[in-house]
Image: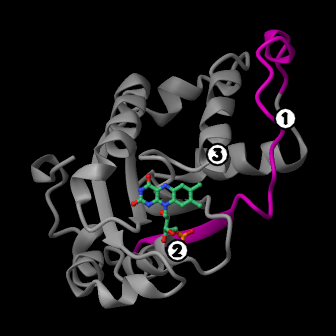
Amino acid sequence: MSERHFVFIEGSSRPNGNSAILARRAEQHLPDGASSEWLRLADLPLPDFDADAASAPIFPDGNEGALLAATLRATDLVIVSPLYWYSVSAPVKRYLDHWDGWLHIPGLRFRRTMAGRTLWAISAGYTDDAGKADGLATSLRLTAEYLGMAWGGLLYGNGDQPGDVRQDHTAMRRAEDFLSPAAVPALRAG
Ligand SMILES: Cc1cc2nc3c(=O)[nH]c(=O)nc-3n(C[C@H](O)[C@H](O)[C@H](O)COP(=O)(O)O)c2cc1C
């Protein structure tokens, strides 16, 4: 896989929310030659993950199949989530829970396939203390580690009412080089 392909998985409960605004800005500044796609979890709702059903796994169809296929296309997977109770939103958590089923699909080798790809996070919350998003960053970083993925880091913006994040000029500026080749993921905080 030579060209980079960024897959944005967006899990806000409202369209064009603050986390999406920040992520759209980052998407406008991808590395040269990179492509992207955007999936809104509200458009592709998943049931709660059922560990028993996953004991006889098959390649899923429907929304789950679409999300799995998109995930497999990603050289770079960008989780776009509002900060909810210091962590990701429920739709994002549910999407990640389904990874456990995907790890058990015979022949898919989900872990081996995702290894070496990069997981990124973009989030917004009402607090201007980015440290309050450490829980979100840590859970995603550890998830990446578990899959053998690289961790790109968290881009956090401050905003509560829709559009507020546009006033967080520091975050909006950081968005412009967050996913770009000049960035050095290993040096990022979080
Ligand atoms: C259920 C819920 C939990 C929230 N928890 C937090 C939180 O822990 N920290 C925070 O700063 N903001 C929290 N917020 C505020 C949202 O993160 C904020 O409104 C953000 O802009 C939403 O992002 P969105 O516009 O992308 O949906 C919470 C909001 C809701 C509805």
Question: Relative to residue 162, is residue 180 depicted above or below?
Answer: above
Q: Is residue 105 left or right of residue 81?
A: right
Mark 1 Cβ and ligand 1 under 8 Å apart: no
Q: Position of residue 190 (x, y in %)?
A: 22, 46
Q: Nearer the viewer, residue 48 or 164?
A: 164
- Specify the label residue 20 is tagged with: 2
The span shown in magenta is 33-58
Tell us which disc is closer to us: 2 or 3: 3
Amino acid at circle 3: Ala
Residue 38 belongs to magenta span: yes
Horizontal placement of 14 versus 161: left or right?
Answer: right
Residue 61 picture location, percent across and down: 89, 41
Instruction: Specify whether residue 3 is in view.
Output: no
Tell me which amino acid carries mark 2. Ala
Depth check: give the residue in front, 189 or 26. 189
Question: Residue, x 40% and y 23% (percent of image)?
Answer: 146
Q: Ligand 1 near label 2 (Cβ, under 8 Å)?
A: yes
Residue with the mark numbered 3? 90
Magenta stretch mostly in which secondary structure? loop
Q: Can residue 166 be seen by looking at this rendering?
A: yes
**Residue that appears at 52% across and 32% down:** 113
Badge 2 local density, few (<14 within 10 Å), some, or many (20+)? many
Real-space CA distance between mark 2 and mark 3, rounded to the nearest whole angstrom? 16 Å
Q: Which residue is mark 1?
A: 60
Q: Nearer the viewer, residue 165 or 119?
A: 165
Looking at the image, residue 159 lies above or below residue 112: below
What residue type is disc 1 on? Answer: Pro
Whole-percent x and y of residue 27? 43, 77
Q: Nearer the viewer, mark 3 or mark 1?
A: 3
